[in-house]
């Protein structure tokens, strides 16, 4: 229903923000990560939104980055994970840290988040790992490729380490792939790196 909301930030806390648009104040639930990067009250802000409708409540969630919104929606797709827990995960860890935990199959990185136990962490990794590997980072075209490649490098190296390759070998293979083909999606980087490792034992 709402793709984004752009307007003046009226108030903000660690988990909530009020944005005024044309005289209407929108109350949005936010993560601690988004909260830390908001401007001071009175500043202009644009938040990507997710509208949640339930029998007992209508809730609006806001995110500074589309990538954070995307991960929030992926978390909601998991049985037993609701908006409150999804926001808690995004508040306890950065998007990159969550992706690393999922791709590298390290549930212990998720245990420190309030409400996330061993079973929930294992379910998050089981259900999202393939989806995370298929996602191309939601980064605007005008952002330098270096930033995109840096995230691809981290995710691809983590995936190769999960397959049993030592970190130095994984880093060397991934760097070689991205040097010749910058901007590749993570899944393609992993495939090309595997081929490079097999061709150069």
Image (spheres, rainbow, N blue to C red):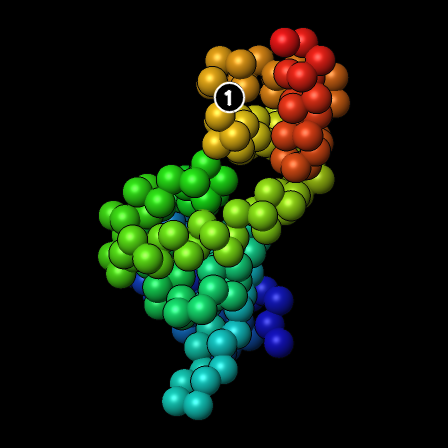
Residue 7 appears in the figure:
no
- Name the quadrant of the N terminus: bottom right
Q: How many labels, in total? A: 1
**Picture quadrant of residue 143:** top right
Q: Residue at x 47, y 18 (%)?
A: 166
Say whether residue 95 is left or right of residue 112.
Answer: right
In this orientation, which residue lies closer to the viewer: 21 or 76? 76
Question: In this picture, is 106 found above or below 170?
Answer: below
Q: Position of residue 86 (x, y in %)?
A: 40, 61
- Residue most toward the top? 201
In the image, residue 164 lies at what x, y percent?
Answer: 49, 25
Q: Can you say which quadrant of the picture contains the C terminus?
A: top right
User: Is residue 146 at all visible to an observer of this figure?
Assistant: yes
Residue at image location 27% in from the left, 49% down from the top = 111
Quarter of the image where one finds residue 83: bottom left
Q: Tag 1: Cα neighbours inside 10 Å, few (<14), some, or many (≥20)?
A: some
Residue furthest right in the image: 181
Disc 1 target residue = 165
Q: Is residue 70 left or right of residue 85?
A: right
**Residue at 74% of width from left, 23% of height from top?**
181
Q: Position of residue 157 (x, y in %)?
A: 53, 26
Q: Is residue 197 above or below residue 37?
A: above
Q: Secondary structure at mark 1?
A: loop
Q: Residue at x 54, y 17 (%)?
A: 171
* Foreground of the two, 68 or 170: 170
How far from the left and from the top, in percent, is residue 100?
45, 38
């Amino acid at each position: 229903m709402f793709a984004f909301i752009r307007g003046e930030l009226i108030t903000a806390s660690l988990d909530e923000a009020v944005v005024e648009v044309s005289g209407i104040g929108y109350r949005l639930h936010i993560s601690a990560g988004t909260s830390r990067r908001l401007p001071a009250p009175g500043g202009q802000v644009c938040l990507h939104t997710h509208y949640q409708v339930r029998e007992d409540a209508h809730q609006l969630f806001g995110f500074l980055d589309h990538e954070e919104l995307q991960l929030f929606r992926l978390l909601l797709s998991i049985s037993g994970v609701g908006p409150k827990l999804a926001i808690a995960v995004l508040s306890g860890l950065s998007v990159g840290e969550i992706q690393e935990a999922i791709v590298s199959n390290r549930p212990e990185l998720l245990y420190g988040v309030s409400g996330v136990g061993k079973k929930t962490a294992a379910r998050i990794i089981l259900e999202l790992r393939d989806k995370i590997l298929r996602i191309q980072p939601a980064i605007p075209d005008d952002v330098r490729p270096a930033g995109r490649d840096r995230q691809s490098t981290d995710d691809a190296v983590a995936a190769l380490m999960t397959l049993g390759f030592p970190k130095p070998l994984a880093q060397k293979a991934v760097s070689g792939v991205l040097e010749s083909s910058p901007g590749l999606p993570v899944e393609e980087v992993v495939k090309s790196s595997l081929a490079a490792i097999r061709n150069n034992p």
